[in-house]
Amino acid sequence: MNQVSERLLKMLHQRSSRLQDGEPISPPLVSVAKYRLDPEPGTPFSYGREANPTVMEVEATIGALEGAVCVAFPSGMAAITGALMACAKQGDRILVPSDGYYTIRLLLEAFLAEIGLDIVTRPTAEYATIDFAGFDLIWIETPSNPVLDVCDIAVISARARAAGAKTVVDNTSATPLLQQPLDLGADMSVCSDTKAMSGHADLLFGHVASRDEDLLAKAKSWRKLSGSVAGPFEAFLVHRGLMTLEVRLERMCRTAARLADLFAQSNKVEQVRYPGLSGDPSYLLAQKQMAKPGFVIGLFFSSEAVAERFIDECALIFPSTSFGGVHTSAERRARWGDDVPPGFVRLSVGCEPEELLIAAVADTLDAL
Ligand SMILES: *Cc1c(COP(=O)(O)O)cnc(C)c1O
């Protein structure tokens, strides 16, 4: 955690510490397609698809937290596509979690299988025992979204490397503040910054981070050639959100731990998944590789009707998809086709006053 604190500090000060007198502390929002050209090619600033100063500012900010080079994309899925294009080639065999973010599987199955990738899906909890021989890329999502199973990034990355495969970690549910996949040996880390990184549910954004020059060059080249370019206004807002990342997550994780205890004690919830509960299957690995067990809780209610009542009747829960925002929110994941029972709810704990939120949830549970 000390190293992460240092990276956090670097992230907060990466802009302010290098400013001259009179320069603004917030990054200038530069909306531009073309720049005045040098007579000699050399400046990265020639055309907006290649480089934008506001986007580069947020890349430097996220890069400080990752301890790596960051390449920004206009959404988490655009970053995931960039990571796949950087790491995979025709004929490659890819392992992806069957219990992870469903859109990744849809993308792989609908498009990339068609052009010659061999996709194998397995649950995150089985990654520990899968033989990686014959695989070229191991796609990891931990904690997995939505059921929050955890796998050992260090062990899996080392085994993958020994088998000649690369590893990419989708770090969206933890964020690089709570979990640092590159330190644990992953080749690339990807994150949907739409979620907790920007934190206000008012934009889409994503990034990849790596310490491997070749992979970074490929990701940048893919971005430039495909035109998957993040906008400066979104970059500006992500930068702003990042300045409060740690205080938001501090509150969200602390309240989540207390709510998880409350759910675990309630007879209205059949099963609770939270990597910070000592009886949870994810507990030991989460203790080992995460700074905190996060702000998302999985709740198994007895039926769809009870789950819907829980969401509707708690005035402090905003019914919506997505997670990591300042508002506590929840949804039934079966509606999206996740492989979970109809009564399964993913709860994302927000920044509301802790005591009021806990009291509101406790009252709702009592009334169910
Ligand atoms: C939301 C999410 C994504 C996709 O991000 P977008 O910004 O919506 O494109 C990818 N992975 C995980 C784990 C997510 O939760």
Image (cartoon, grey):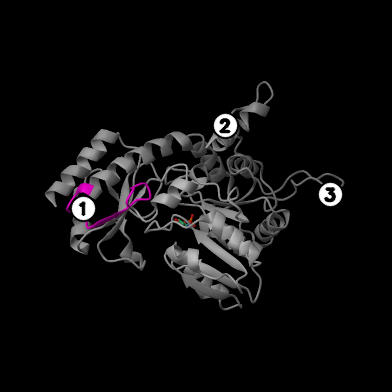
Give the residue pinned by disc 2: 9
Residue 221: quarter of image: bottom right
Apparent side of residue 146 relative to residue 34 in the rendered image (left or right): left
Query: Which region shows up in magenta?
Result: 265-279
Q: Which mark's residue is nearer the viewer, 1 or 3?
A: 1
Where is residue 118? Give x, y as percent: 57, 76
Where is residue 139? Give x, y as percent: 54, 63
Q: What residue type is disc 3 on?
A: Pro
- In primary-sequence order, the first of circles 2 and 1 is 2
Q: What residue type is disc 2 on?
A: Leu
Mark 1 in CB contact with mark 3 (< 8 angstroms): no
Give the residue pinned by disc 1: 310
What secondary structure prevails in the magenta region?
Answer: loop
Q: Is 340 inside the magenta-drawn segment?
A: no
Where is residue 148? Give x, y as percent: 39, 56
Where is residue 197? Give x, y as percent: 49, 44
Q: Is residue 75 visible?
A: no
What crowding class fits label 2: few (fewer than 14 Cα within 10 Å), some (14-19), or many (20 or more)? Answer: few
Separation of disc 1 and disc 3 at Cα?
61 Å
Give the residue pinned by disc 3: 41
Q: Is 276 inside the magenta-drawn segment?
A: yes
Separation of disc 2 and disc 3 at Cα?
36 Å
Apparent side of residue 177 relative to residue 306 in the rendered image (left or right): right
- Residue 162 is labelled as none
Q: Is residue 284 visible?
A: yes
Tell me the residue at 75%/47% (across/down): 44
- Work out whether residue 155 or residue 199 is closer to the camera in this orientation and state it: 155
Residue at the left extreme, as displayed:
367
